[in-house]
């Protein structure tokens, strides 16, 4: 595996907390502490387009590919829904007074992970709140949907992972997963495994087909593991951490393949918050508290 730094995108004025695909292989959105939502194109480096100003910190973005609406989760100000085609805020509502740490949309339902320990379920067509599910005394940090089993997993700052049935939003299982806050939950592309990471700096893998039995526990980083993402072919995954590094792993053996950090490849200067692995030249995108977005070409 050979890693090459392709570019660095600058434009944000504060920490960059989140990046998501624009549903193409080469475009993505970013946002963070400055409240700016910027659209980028890997084919046109550092030519970002400002598409929204939230006014407050943004921790989460989610693209509804059916309507081509971009959901913007604001810090203590609810959500804004941006009509991308017309570059217009279609809907804004303080659906919660808590921070929104994650948003996932599937089958006309939006799941919001809130800072008060609640999962909020919204009906996408009507933009109405349908359900509040209290799962933790502290923040809900991450949500992942498994289309194969029709379940979704939730990680919280009470150190737990919860498995829900998507149909009736019934709790199926709670796993005392980590020894500190769970920051990221992610199903493998085939839906067979659930990967979880958190403040304890570990990656834990759970067997979905065997009632979420523990598969392995990897001491992955020096400090909190903020996010995990899979390569387009599913054969590798990447993690990023508060220790300023990005690590690339083999999905089958769970073995470390490569480290990206400041000393080796001119990595980030501060905490790396989110990753996006694209199919455009197998480029991996990372964002950080250093206000930068970096792009890495992964040759395997």
Image (cartoon, rainbow, N blue to C red):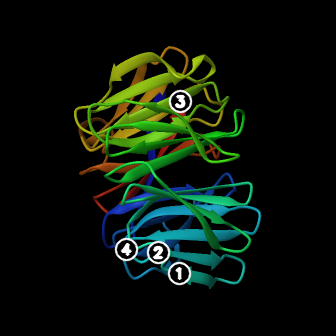
Please report the residue visible at 55 percent of the width from the left and 17 percent of the height from the top.
Answer: 252
Q: Are marks 3 and 2 in contact (CB under 8 Å)?
A: no
**Dot 1 or dot 3, earlier in sequence:** 1
Q: Secondary structure at mark 1?
A: strand
Comparing labels 1 and 3, the label whose residue is closer to the camera: 1
Which one is in front, 197 or 252? 197
Please report the residue visible at 63 percent of the width from the left and 24 percent of the height from the top.
Answer: 192
Which one is in front, 160 or 143? 160
Picture coordinates of residue 133 (x, y %)? 50, 54
Picture coordinates of residue 88 (x, y %)? 63, 85
Gap between marks 2 and 4 measured at Cα: 6 Å
Please name the residue that numbered disc 3 is placed on: 194
Whether residue 238 appears in this view of the structure is yes
**Dot 4 or dot 1, earlier in sequence:** 4
Gap between marks 1 and 2 measured at Cα: 6 Å
**Dot 1 or dot 2, earlier in sequence:** 2
**In the depicted structure, whether residue 9 falls above or below residue 275:** below
Q: Are marks 1 and 2 in contact (CB under 8 Å)?
A: yes
Q: Which mark is residue 78?
A: 2
Picture coordinates of residue 1 (x, y %)? 49, 25
Gap between marks 3 and 4 measured at Cα: 30 Å
Please name the residue that numbered disc 4 is placed on: 76
């Amino acid at each position: 595996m050979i890693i090459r730094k392709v570019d660095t995108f600058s434009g944000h004025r504060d920490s960059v907390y989140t990046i998501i695909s624009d549903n193409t292989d080469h475009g993505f959105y970013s946002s963070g502490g400055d409240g700016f939502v910027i659209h980028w194109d890997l084919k046109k480096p550092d030519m970002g387009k400002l598409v929204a100003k939230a006014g407050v910190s943004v921790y989460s973005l989610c693209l509804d590919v059916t309507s081509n609406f971009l959901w913007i989760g604001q810090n203590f100000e609810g959500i804004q829904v941006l009509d991308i085609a017309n570059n217009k805020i279609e809907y804004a509502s303080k659906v919660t007074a808590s921070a929104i740490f994650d948003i996932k949309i599937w089958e006309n339902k939006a799941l919001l992970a809130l800072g008060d320990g609640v999962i909020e379920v919204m009906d996408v067509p009507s933009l109405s709140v349908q359900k509040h599910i209290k799962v933790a005394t502290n923040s809900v940090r991450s949500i992942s949907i498994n289309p194969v089993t029709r379940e979704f997993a939730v990680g919280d700052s009470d150190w737990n992972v919860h498995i829900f049935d998507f149909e009736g939003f019934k709790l199926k299982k709670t796993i005392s997963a980590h020894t500190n806050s769970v920051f990221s939950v992610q199903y493998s592309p085939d839906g067979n495994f659930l990967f979880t990471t958190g403040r304890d700096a570990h990656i834990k893998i759970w067997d979905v087909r065997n009632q979420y039995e523990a598969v392995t526990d990897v001491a992955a980083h020096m400090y909190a593991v903020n996010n995990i993402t899979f390569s387009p072919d599913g054969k590798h995954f990447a993690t990023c951490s508060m220790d300023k590094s990005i690590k690339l792993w083999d999905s089958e053996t769970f073995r470390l393949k490569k480290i990206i950090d400041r000393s080796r490849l001119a990595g980030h200067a501060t905490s790396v918050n989110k990753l996006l692995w694209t199919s455009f030249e197998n480029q991996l995108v990372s964002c950080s508290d250093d206000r930068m977005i970096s792009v890495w070409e992964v040759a395997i």
